[in-house]
Each structure stands twice: as structure tokens, then as C-alpha cells.
Image (spheres, helix red, strand yellow):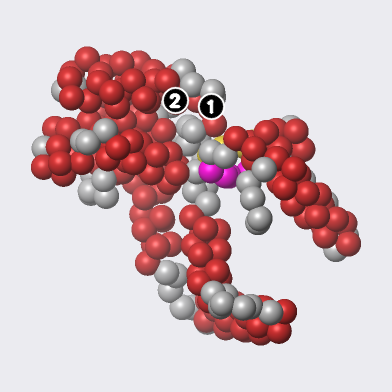
Amino acid sequence: MPNRRTATYSELFQRLEQEATMMGKQFDPRHIISDFEAALILVIRQKFPAATHTRCMFHFNQSVHRKIMDLGLGTDYAQDASTREQCKQLMALCLMPVSEVEYQFNRIHTIASPSLDDLFMYLYRQWIDGHIPLSMWNFYDLNHRTNNICEAYNRRFGTRFMKKYPNIWTFIQLIQSENARCEHLIIQLDAGASSSKQSTRRTMFQSRFETLKTRFSSNEISAKMLLDKLGLLIGGHKI
């Protein structure tokens, strides 16, 4: 895309609708995952008012982690276990039930190191009481939480297309190559080939997350314990 303006996104969706019509289909998504671009959010809200629009969990955690670095907390995050644990729990708030998010945020703040005050202020102003509704960055009831698959493919495709002076013939050859690759992957999967390591990690994450949700809903663990364990899950630890 040439830019990230509202008009550009509107044209993009208009063309997708036209392509869908030509294929005898209807372009009317029920669930949309995106990053936090204001122009994109506005266009989606206008064009697909009935769709459930959530942000990408990866981008949420990336934003929090970037703020940690911007505030000069990188050393504490890397070397101090308590600081790292509290930061991971802040990231894990996006996986808590909506009704628990603000209370758990305030609870962590009361026991956190004063050095994290600016980070808590950022989270409150940007996410807890900011212009993005909590429901848009909460993933407790969602199975699909990221658009990483799309972004990874886009990055891989863009890397293969990197030429100083690309032309239409180069593009056609790349499309043909991608088509052959996809057909080959389908044959492999139909023959019983295992999925990628990334898919395995996603499956393991989902399984552990669902186990925690079940334990919480059955009152086996408290909201505090749930957040503690989600912080470990975000950090990639076994629970």
C-alpha cells in the first residue's frame, strides 16, 4: 500500500468487495483482526459495523514491551525477576476476563516498584481508560488472537519480491512460484506431514490457556492466580 490513510483503506476494501462479487461471493467478514492504526479502525467501523473487530495480541504486547524499553526499564526487565514478572502480568491483562482487567491492573500497581509508575501511567491512559475500548484488546473469549500468519507471509513475499526495478513479469513469476509452493504444501499436509513448529506452539498455548480458563471458571484458581499463571504463559514458561 502507498500509505496508511483512510481513503486508501476505503479503496482497498472497495476493491476487495468488487473482487468478491466477480467470484460470486460476498465480502462481509464477521471477525477482523488488525493492528492499532487509527485510519484502519475508522474504516472498518464504517464499512463493517456488524463485524467483531479486535486488535492483534502480538501488537498489544509489542507496544507494552516497546514502552518498557522507551522508559529505560530494559535493564531492570532483563535482570530483575520481580520487575519482569510484573511487566509480564501487565501484558497478560489482555487474556483476563474483561470484568477483572481494571481491578487486577490496580492490584498490581499497589505492589509494583515505583520505578514502574510511568509504565502504569502509560497503560492506564492508552489502554485502560484510553481511546481504544478494552473490548478491542481483550482476547479472553477469542481463539484467533493475532494476524502473525498474514504478516509473516507478507514479509516473506515482500522479501522475495525485493528487486531494484521489479516489473510485471517478475511479479507473475513470483505468483506462479507461490501457487506451486502452496499446492506442494497441501499435498504434504494431505499425506500426513506435520504442521510447522509455530503451529505447534500456538496449539500448546491454546491448550494451556483453555485449561487455565476452565480452572478459573470452576473456582479452582482465583483471578490473582489466573493472572500469575497467564504471566508465565506469556513468558513462554510451562505452567
- Provide residue 206's location: percent of width, then percent of height: 41, 48
Does label 1 or label 2 sit earlier along the sequence?
2
The dominant secondary structure in magenta is: strand
Q: Is residue 31 magenta?
A: yes
* Cα separation between marks 1 and 2: 7 Å
Q: Is residue 231 left or right of residue 151?
A: left
Question: What residue is drawn where x is 48% and y is 32%?
Answer: 138
Residue type at the position of mark 1: Ile
Magenta-tinted stretch? 30-35
- Provide residue 17's location: percent of width, then percent of height: 82, 52
- Provide residue 74's location: percent of width, then percent of height: 20, 41
- Provide residue 40's location: percent of width, then percent of height: 64, 40
Q: Quadrant of the C terminus?
A: top left
Contact? badges 1 and 2 (CB < 8 Å): yes
Structural crowding at the residue carrying mark 2, measured as other residues with C-alpha within 10 Å and reported as few (<14), some (14–19) or many (≥20): few
Specify the label residue 126 is tagged with.
2
Dot 2: element = helix
Determine which quarter of the picture holds residue 123.
top left
Q: Does residue 7 lie above or below 194 as drawn?
A: above
